Amino acid sequence: MSLLDNMRKHRVYATANTQGHIFEYASELGLDMETFTTEYMTSDFCNLEMDSDYSPFQNELDVPCMEVISNEFRTKGIKIPVDAQKSYRYCAYYIGFVYRYLQVLSGLSSKELVLRIPYEKMRLQYFFDHYEYVDAIKTICNYEGIQYE
């Protein structure tokens, strides 16, 4: 494995980790994660910044990212309801992480991914296979017929 391959894997992991933390933070804020996931994955922020080959937001902390995301939602009149029970934050992290990793591996846009694999499917996958991200990603790809590198 070359140095460039190692660097690419690190970049993919770092971007997935950033998105995982964005989802975890949304959960900690008490946002309804199903609504947040759909709105986030179809947002300009996600599709312009996170889906791109490079954006400084891909290595940013969750709070600054959420400020930009919240501003976009506010500007567009999108309101994310509060979930009184709060989602399990590790589940939220997993969902964000896996969506980003799937996007990079498959080349599908985040908008396409959330249509093919809605939040509820991803949440159920967490409870089946969350200790092994690589296995979970392969399982999701095989089950959904998604080609990946």
Image (spheres, rainbow, N blue to C red):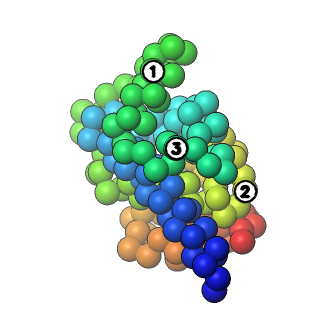
Q: Which residue is mark 2?
A: 107
- For the point 39% across and 28% down, the residue is 67
Q: Name which residue type carries label 3.
A: Pro
Q: Name which residue type carries label 1.
A: Asn
- For the point 66% across and 64% down, the residue is 105
Q: Residues within 10 Å of mark 2 (few under 14, many from 20)?
A: some
Label 3: which secondary element: helix
Q: Position of residue 111 (x, y in %)?
A: 66, 41
Q: Name which residue type carries label 2.
A: Gly
How many angstroms separate mark 2 from mark 1 (CA)? Answer: 27 Å
In the displayed structure image, the side of residue 84 where residue 128 appears, left or right: right
- For the point 46% across and 50% down, the residue is 59
Is residue 136 in view? no
Q: Quadrant of the N terminus?
A: bottom right
Above or below residue 149? Residue 29 is above
In the displayed structure image, the side of residue 122 where residue 138 appears, left or right: right
In primary-sequence order, the first of circles 3 and 1 is 3
Label 1: which secondary element: helix
Q: Mark 3 or 1, which is nearer the eye?
A: 3
List the single residue furthest toward the front.
3
Q: Residue 6 versus residue 103: which sits nearer the camera?
A: 6
Q: Residue 89 versus residue 47: which sits nearer the camera?
A: 47
Above or below residue 96? Residue 49 is above
